[in-house]
Structures are given as structure tokens and as C-alpha cells.
Amino acid sequence: MGEITYPKEVLDKMQSIIDDCMGDAPPYCQATCPMHTDVKEYVNLIAEGKHKDAIKVIREKLFLPATLGRICAHPCEEECKREDAFKQPMAIATLKRFAADNYDNKNDWDLNIEEEKAQKVAIIGAGPAGAQAALDLRKKGYDITIYERLSVVGGMMRVGIPEYRLPRNIIDHEYSLLEDMGVKFKMGVDVGKDISFEELKKNYDAVIIAVGAHKGVAIPVSGYDTKGVLNAVDFLREVSLTRKYDIGKKIAVIGGGNVAIDVARSARRVGSEEVHLVCLEDKPDMPAHDWEVEEAEEEGVILHDGFGPENIIAKDGRVEGFEIKKCLSIFDKGGKFNPLFDENSKKVLEVDNIIFAVGQAVDNSFVPDGELEIVRGGRFKVDDVTLQTKVENVFVAGDASGRAVIAIEAMAEGRKAAISVDRYFRGQDLTEDRDNEGSYKTWLRTELKEDEADFPRVKTTQINPLVRVTSFEEVDLGFTEKDAIKEASRCLKCECKLCMKECEMLGDYCECPKELFENILKSGEVDPMIPYSCNMCSQCTIVCPEEFPIKDRFMDMRKAMVKANNGKSPIKGHAAIEVHQALGFSRLFNTAKSAKK
């Protein structure tokens, strides 16, 4: 058979399938997971009772499944099709926790490392960003050392998230993977004091700054410097490390996010009998998760939604009260943060302490002035794609660059920094083909069946509020196996492979039409059995959302093959085809309807 030449119009038609086929489009959950965990796969394995297989899939992308199963803010659930249609998203994070808590065996952890390399990397910070960068680079064979100011690992997951949400043994257990792989830890080492930043740059081939945002901030409201006014970061750190805090019986917390909720609930556990939560937003618009607000109120937290601070009242230099006023709007007509208050709606809360939970900043004091560029909140300026600073061997990951808000975003930033460092060492382009790192909107488009049932989300069991406020024991008990299987079975399995379900032949040769035609255009070759296996039934086209005429493309291939083979079938022993081709143009086997009436 001679060389096959496809006309340009035929190639263009193949390309149109490649451009618009959604067969390889990830489901909404996977695309919006910053680490692109194969959510659909592991959720459906749980539904099938294949729990060991599920945790194996999870660990392909996440080394903290039990941790994230408890504290991840799960952007995947926000884009879940069940959330879009019924406001009842899949409990993806809780299903992850179920698999990790019950079926994750340390003996199964992947400890494989590439050939040892000469380059050494220092990572400042043992939070999720630093840990992920360390893990990825260690797998590549690099010599990795983490420097951590605290005596414990986990960063803000450890000292910013209360123990009743995330037991500390979970963090320690999952972080042990790093030590097992040979990552070295220098704990209790304060960079800038115990060792200089310049020493790290001198002694290591690259440095990754992943210090997180460990500085609390306060609103400059009148009296904010009064004794008894605290910030959330310092409060949560002390409570996390000691389970204690010398705090008053009546306190007010300023803020409407998850950190503010953590502060309020932690205050109840260290002895505050009356906790007021003051936030500008009305309850439905609070940044905190709905269930977090609900659980706080169950524990006796008093919510003052739609209120802002007016004045901190002091007596003998200490907090005695907190004056607040009704917030009419938070943003002005231009969309800028510019709260408008009702000056006639003021009221006073009698409190002993006030805790600001309105934001965090980065402590960058360990870096000499002018060494790196600093932006808002003390964060380091980096290249958006590579996370590289103006110093070529210094990179930044996580909240230290202001690009991560939640733990799994910090992990994704750590992975991105690791990719950049690896490329830097190899002398490769740091920017090439990095469009899909982190969350993105999938090009998948699916419609629910008209009769799709709105199965309610399965709820976990929680400790009674009156009991749980007396200790830091874990509040949420997770799923039983029965509940996990029931919840996982709600998954709609979002994908566009309708043609693959209709055509057994396609399934023999590809994962989706896009893959098939990409390979054909790339190589210029195709096995004749592929187009000749198509029975020209058009079922693939009928179910395709784009109505791609795939059979026509296979017919184009057949014609090109026959032409290149001197008018004969390209398949050996295919004489019947040749007879059919001859008869197809015989008057004995064809009739023609006259154009005349």
C-alpha cells in the first residue's frame, strides 16, 4: 500500500473533533480541586465497596488524605453538579476521610525515590505548602531540609485550626511520610535569628519560602491597643499548643470567616461562658461555611451579624465593653470595601476581651531589607506562573505569596514551586506548558436527566454540643461504611463519553474520539482495522452533544486507504470488500429514481 495522503478538508474535519470533543474533559470536581485529585474515581470506588482501591487513588495526588478529609474547604463541592442542581453537593471531603481513616495502611505508602541528585534545597516552613514542595522534590532525588520555627509540624493547620476539628495525631502520622522518605527537619529553628537567610542561600542550591501568614492584624478602631484586645493568630496558636488561655468569661470576636468561628468555638472550650461574634455581613452572606456557623450557634456563640465595630470601651486601661453599630452596606457603588453604618443603631456588649479575626499577615523579617520585593500584607512578590522571586534560586509557596487561602491551595502552590525548582536545576524553561496547574474551569458540559432524583446529602454523626464544648475532642465522627457507600452512590459520574457507551468498537481503540484523532494527526498513520471496524450506524453521532459525524471521518480514511492501495481494500484477505466495491457501482445492484415525474 502506498503512502496515505489525507486532503486538507479531511484533516480539518478531524481537527474540529479534537478541538471540541469533551471526552477527556475532567469532571467539575477534579478540575476545581487545586491538586486535581481523581474525585469521581475514588468516590465511585467507595460506592462499589472498593475502599482500599479508593485510598490508593487518593494517595496518587494527596499525602494528607485524613487531614484534608477533615479541614479542606473543598472547592470541588462548590462546583459539584448536585450543588448546582439541588444545593446538595457530594460530601467529597468526608468520603476522603472515610477511606483514609479506615483503609490507609502505612505499609502501602509509596516511598520510591529517583536517583539521588547533588542539589540541596532548603524549605522555610513545615506547613502544607512547604511539606508538599519537600515531598515532590525528594521524590525527584534532591536533598531536602525543612526549617521550622515551631517545635511541631503542620504550620497553620497545626496552630491555626483547633484540635476539635483536626486531631494532632492525624497530622503527625501523615507527615511521617516525609521522614520515611529522607526529608530532614530542623525544628525550633528561627530563620533570621538562629540561622540567617543569607546562610541558607549560600549553603543550598535553592530556597523555598513557605512560612505562611502567622501575624495577626487588627482594625484600627478606637481603643484597639487597649489591654485585653487580642488577635486570632496568637490566640489560636496558644490554644493549639497548650489547650489553655487566660481569657475572660465574656468575650467578643470580630470577623465573619472560618477563622473567626474557630476563635469563638475555641474560646468556649477554654472557659469563656459568653461569646459574641460580630461581623459586617448578614448571616447568609458570611464568608464562613454555613455548617460552621450553625455548629458555633449550637455551642452557644451569640451572633451579631450585620454589625461592625464603633469603639472599644476601657476602664483602668482594660477592656470593659465593645460598642458596635448596624452595617447598612459593605461595599460602595464602585465595588470597593467601604462600609456604611447606621449611626443611630449603636449598642454596647459587656466583655472582658476582644479578639480580632479579620486577616493575617506574613512575618518577612528574616529576609534582609531590599533582598526580595514585598507586597501587601508582608507577602513576597513572585512570578505568577513559576513562583520565582527576583533572586533566581529563591521561590515562594503558599500564603507567603498571597496566592493560597486554604490548605489544599497551599499544597498546590508547593507542588508548583517544586516543579519550578526541578526545572531550574535541569536548565529547563520554567514557564512552558503550565496552564492547568491549580484550579480551572473544565470544558465539560453535562445536563442532568429530567427525572434525576434529588437524593439528600448524608450527614455525619456529631458529639452533642453540650458535651463537646467541655473538651477539644473531635466533634465530627465521620461516616460509617454504610453511610459512606450511600453518600458515594449519589455521584452523577459527570463525564462526556456517551459515544463510548454506545459503540463497543471505539472502546477497543481509544478512551475517547479526541484521543483517537489526535494520534492519527500526530503520526499520520492508522490501523486499517479501525475505520473498517465501524459499521456506519451513526449511534455515536446521535448521542454526541456536538453531533460529530464520526462515521464520515472513518469513511474518509477508508477512501484514502483504498486509493493508496490501487483501489483495493488495505486489509489482507478482504476480497469480499473488493467485490462489494465493484458491485456497488453495478446497475445490477443499484437503482436510480428518475428525476422526471
Image (cartoon, rainbow, N blue to C red):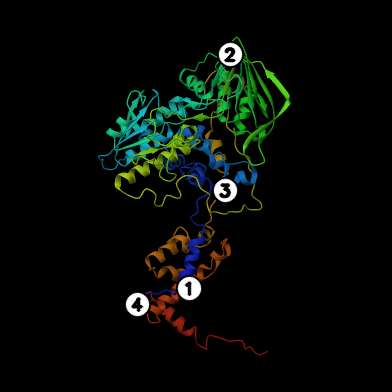
Q: Give the position of the N terminus as an image quadrant.
A: bottom left
Secondary structure beneath dot 2 equals loop
Alpha carbon distance from label 4 to label 1: 21 Å
Disc 4 residue type?
Gly
Secondary structure beneath dot 3 equals loop
Q: Earlier in the sequence, mark 2 or mark 3?
A: 2
Q: Which residue is mark 4?
A: 2
Task: State which mark lies toward you, 3 or 4.
Answer: 4
Lateral position of residue 338 relative to residue 101, left or right: right
Alpha carbon distance from label 4 to label 2: 89 Å
Q: Which residue is mark 2?
A: 248
Alpha carbon distance from label 3 to label 4: 48 Å
Disc 1 residue type?
Glu
Alpha carbon distance from label 2 to label 3: 50 Å
Q: Earlier in the sequence, mark 4 or mark 1?
A: 4
User: How far across and down, in percent of the image, does residue 133 sit?
Assistant: 38, 38
The residue carrying pointer 1 sits among few (fewer than 14), some (14 to 19) or many (20 or more) residues within 10 Å by Cα, namely few
Disc 2 residue type?
Gly
The residue carrying pointer 2 sits among few (fewer than 14), some (14 to 19) or many (20 or more) residues within 10 Å by Cα, namely some
Q: Which mark is residue 402?
A: none
